[in-house]
Amino acid sequence: MKNIITYCLLSLMIPATSLFADQEEKPLYKDKKQVIEKRIEDLLSRMTLAEKVMQLNQYTLGRNDNANNMADPVNDIPGEIGSLIYFSSDPELRNRVQHKAMEQTRLGIPILFGYDVIHGFRTIYPISLGQACSWNPGLVEQACAVAAQETRMSGVDWTFSPMIDVARDGRWGRVAEGYGEDPYTNAVFAVASVKGYQGTSLSSKKNVAACLKHYIGYGASEAGRDYVYTEISKQTLWDTYMLPYQEGVKAGAATLMSSFNDISGTPGSANKYTLTEVLKNQWKHDGFVVSDWGSIEQLRPQGVAADKKDAAFKAFQAGVEMDMMNRCYDQHLGDLVKEGKVSQDRLDDAVRRVLRVKFRLGLFDQPYTAVTKEKDRFFLPASLAIAEKLAEESVVLLKNEHKILPLTNVSKIAVVGPMAKNQFDLLGSWAAHGNQDRMVTIYEALKAEYQGKAEVSYAQGCNFDGDLTSGFEEAKNLASKSDVVVLCLGEKRGWSGENASRSTIALPAIQEQLVMELKKLGKPVILILSSGRPLDLTRLAPLSEAMLTIWQPGTPAGKPVAGVVSGRVNPSGKLSMTFPYTSGQIPVYYNQRQSARPHQGKYQDIPSTPLYEFAHGLSYTTFQYGDIKVSAAQLKRNTPLKVEVSVTNTGDRDGYETVHWFISDPVSTISRPVKELKHFDKQWIKKGETATYQFEVDLERDLGFVDGEGKRILESGDYYVMVKDKKVKIEIVD
């Protein structure tokens, strides 16, 4: 009996001992019950130099990977790679590569999959410049959440978005990707985007890591040309370009992308001041910085690196943790460490930052993406509704003579122009996996909108460019038999975006010529303009009774346009970027510094004021503003200040109105812009009703200025708070 009892006890002890042994053998970094920082340090302590270096590199996957005509792409991907740009929307390919990383490498570190999801993944919403014209950050946050859901469910964990470059030159093609010319506006939409993409938890299977780009000053590129030099003083760097990134970091953005541009002699991807001293030391950002595509290697043609090894050294020491498609880090970083040129501490800090994002995304515990059907990921009814709503609110009514819009009481409508039956170009640049087959053209949408009310007919008239006028006669014949001409013009999607600079922002001559020919018929002309930038409309404005800029609306395409034309939708968009009188005015923007001679220095051949100013936008109703009321006209520092204004809808229909609050400091230690946007609010006001708009002013933040080192300064003296043509004086006393 004693032997039996002993045997039983031993039998019970064996599995227990084995269990303890298994626990001891299980690495701490694989224990999801441990805090992330402990898991990072445990994993870091186990990694070899080669494994650390590979975590700091990004390759590509998913382009031309057809198994029928090439080798399995998985074979070409090292399992130890830190990240991949994933061009596919198939989670199965992603999972196969991830399996290689998790199961066929020594430590099983998951790969981070990224992609350029700029304004939607498959459900495409308007380009960012158009989104800003909605002045509805809550709606933009919802749209980014839609993009995140579709993205994460398709195998991508990380988006290279939002782009928050303050941009004041419409010739630069990348103005389409940002939120316009104003620092505060970019900051607000940066925060909204980060919240939408990242949600409350990065580990959610419907959220992705955001990436603020392009850090920093890329929008200041000379003459609107891509990749070129930018001359930016420390003062301008801080008071114009830093704010959106600072607010995006505060909102928790997981990553940033270094810029291509040379900033006053030090390129963005080798700039230790911006990447380390500011971002890491001042702002305490604990995520990582990825280079823009090739921006490390491009330190050579920029003249600051002798070769790829030198480029790797300078970018890495400046604060770029991940190498996007430069092949500089994987080839040279290990040698730089061995040679003592890069310290082990700097290497470990970089790897730690990359691992931290991966842990926060939950990739170590749930590395694979559930394989679902496309119908369960894309074009969900709620997603389409958000995209359509955002497209509606992005439309800006630039002009509306004699209240010709909304278009009612007409029997025959001629729809003309190269954009009328277009789908592809309405998706806009950087349209990810957008599907044009899901889109309804402007012509089709107008036919549906006016079914049973008016006859809608079509003629192309001309192409987007070239000199072929053979379609003019058909368009003129159609227009002559119609009550009104809806003329759909604009830019191809490839005319804006990266490497899409233009010397003029006017439409091609053939399109302007078509307008001139149709105007001769004496019929009212309504211009529908789709573009990725502000346009030079100085010759077109006099030829049209009404003009709508619809930007590039994405998947909703023609439906929101038709709704605005018919009056089903009351337009509420207001410009986030100035429309110059001509391209020759560029750069022209609302918050320019004060002139030494305000009464002189004007152009002699054209007006010096723009055609349509920042925040311009008409409605089908009218709004009357009351006087600005303040809680105190004289106050000391650190005293709360509340200002408010009442707005009454005096028209005959309900509508949205956005109130923009500006401040002006007429006398300061440094010169201040003529006015600066500090707050905006959009409200729905029913006809005959009044809404109160409030602005709770933080004196230091909203009235003060930032110096060349990022320090906020509030001086005593007079300030003005302004709304439209209303203003009130505030005095700060010591």
Image (cartoon, helix red, strand yellow):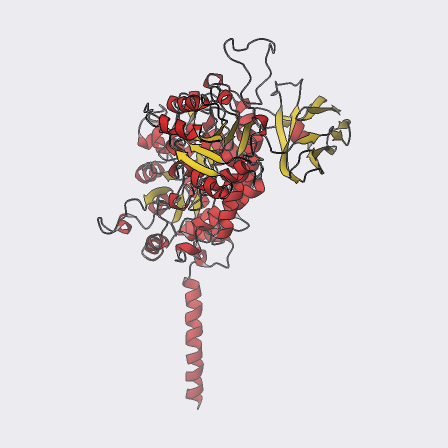
Could you say where residue 208 lies in the image, as x and y percent from the top left?
Answer: 47, 48
Image quarter where the N terminus lies is bottom left
Q: Is residue 447 visible?
A: yes
Image quarter where the C terminus lies is top right
Of residues 471 and 432, the one drawn nearer to the viewer in this rendering: 471
Could you say where residue 3 lies in the image, as x and y percent from the top left?
Answer: 41, 87
Q: For residue 29, what is the image quadrant? A: bottom left
Left or right of 614? Residue 77 is left
Of residues 106 and 254, the one drawn nearer to the viewer in this rendering: 254
Q: In this picture, is 536 found above or below 28?
A: above
Of residues 197 and 24, the one drawn nearer to the viewer in this rendering: 197
Q: Residue at x 43, y 26 (%)?
A: 172
Q: Is residue 290 visible?
A: no
Q: Residue at x 37, y 55 (%)?
A: 108
Of residues 151 and 332, the one drawn nearer to the viewer in this rendering: 151
Left or right of 719? Residue 497 is left
Q: In this picture, is 671 found above or below 640?
A: above
Could you say where residue 630 lies in the image, as x and y percent from the top left?
Answer: 75, 30
Left or right of 356? Residue 402 is right
Residue at the outermost bottom position: 1
Left or right of 604? Residue 420 is left
Could you say where residue 312 lies in the image, as x and y percent from the top left?
Answer: 36, 34
Tally of numbered tags = 0
